[in-house]
Amino acid sequence: MSQPKKTFNDLKKDIIDNQICTSCGTCEAVCPVNAIELKNTIPNLIGNCIECGICYANCPSASFDADDMDQKVFGRTRKPIEKLTGIYQKAYQAKTTQEDIHSKAQDGGVVTALLTQFLNEGGDAVIVADLEEDKIWVPKPKVAKTREEVIKAAGTKYTPSPALVGVKQAVKIEKLEKIAVVGTTCQMRGLSLATDGPLKNKKIADAVALKIGLFCMETFNYDDYMQYLKDNDVDPGQVTKFEIKNGRFYAWNGEERLHRAKLANVKPLIRSTCSHCTDFTSEYSDISVGNVGSPAGHSTVIVRNEKGQKILDAAIKSGLIEAILIEDFDKEETLVHKLAEMKKSSHQ
Ligand SMILES: Cc1cc2nc3c(=O)[nH]c(=O)nc-3n(C[C@H](O)[C@H](O)[C@H](O)COP(=O)(O)OP(=O)(O)OC[C@H]3O[C@@H](n4cnc5c(N)ncnc54)[C@H](O)[C@@H]3O)c2cc1C
């Protein structure tokens, strides 16, 4: 006998009320009757639920089978050396050559440079995390169509930006046909359910031409984050960049360091949902980018499939990116492997 479908009521009970919603926005993006909307990053029912079960089936906190998804996205199972990193082809250390990108970017500016390459190749838009105009450090998904818009959204926001709400805007509302999406691990998992999962969304699957995943250990709760800054006499309105590096949390205004703390001090800001995530490197993307394992001002890049290799090669060829191969990545001894192992073993 088949199981009854799990609907938005179950999503509310199992995921939202249990505080394991990642705020990726996938439920809003895939709802066929547009009955779900995120308010303050939490999904709400705003219309009549037709009990189709699509939101629950596409929720990365509810329905994610990693082995099945490896097969669906990459067409094979993991080799033993891919246990910690997810399926990949090669890894690089890279940075952009474009000073206007590098100066605004978090690390090597590789993500922004790849997105620029995607637009140059005729992509309609890229989904990035910009900031709300009238709120301090509140991320919002942006359907960026120009190089300037992409550069404006460069840099890391440590609170969630529901990337899939941007996908909905681009695909369902603006009817765009070729988009790239950048996002954290949970967002890439939600997106992969929407493009390749058992109840996938054909329009989204057809439109998403490139997935760029970010390495991610955790995200912060916005209210706790702002309170922490206040308690430490940091005016978030003055901060141009937040950074987590070498076991420290920093706030910068240009070159001026406004705050430095041990990571243990910011641990209480981590959202409870992150403690269930076992994916450090955004295993379900075409190409993943982070900073660990590379010198300051550079990015570590994991190419997972042909699509990822093609966009990186094109960006190198057009002079946007410089990259060198990380020869010993297969030895599984890099900092990326160490942190990926830490996340898998400490989270469940
Ligand atoms: C919440 C979070 C935690 C991270 N934790 C780690 C970590 O532990 N270790 C590590 O090595 N790397 C981590 N990263 C990745 C790192 O901060 C950089 O994003 C990465 O190195 C790429 O640098 P870049 O200079 O190429 O990116 P940039 O060229 O600056 O581009 C970054 C892109 O990411 C988008 N973005 C920023 N914030 C978000 C967000 N919250 N959600 C979705 N998209 C976003 C921006 O809009 C931009 O398009 C984290 C990123 C995030 C967002």
Image: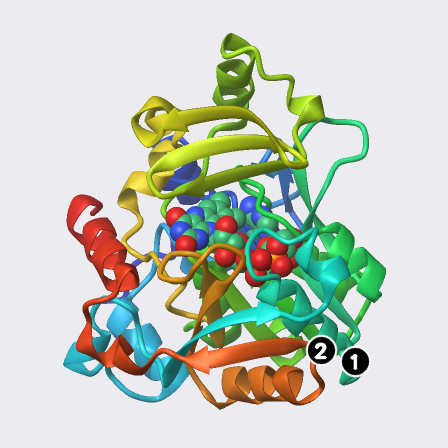
Rendered image: mark on residue 117: 2
* Residue 28 showing in the rendered view: no
Give the residue at x 34% y 56%: 280
Asked if marks 1 and 2 touch (Cβ < 8 Å), the reply is yes
Rendered image: mark on residue 120: 1
Give the residue at x 65% y 47%: 35
Give the residue at x 57% y 68%: 95
* Residue 152 showing in the rendered view: yes
Q: Nearer the viewer, residue 30 or 116?
A: 116
Residue 81: name its quadrant.
bottom left
Q: Amino acid at mark 1?
A: Asn
Q: Nearer the viewer, residue 314 or 45?
A: 314
Q: Is residue 133 above or below residue 102?
A: above
Is 180 on the left-hand or right-hand side of 212? right
The x and y percentages for residue 73 are 41, 80
Distance from disc 1 to disc 2, alpha carbons, whole Å, reads 5 Å
Q: Judging from the image, what secondary structure is the residue with disc 2 in?
A: helix
Q: Amino acid at mark 2?
A: Gln
Residue 111: name its quadrant.
bottom right
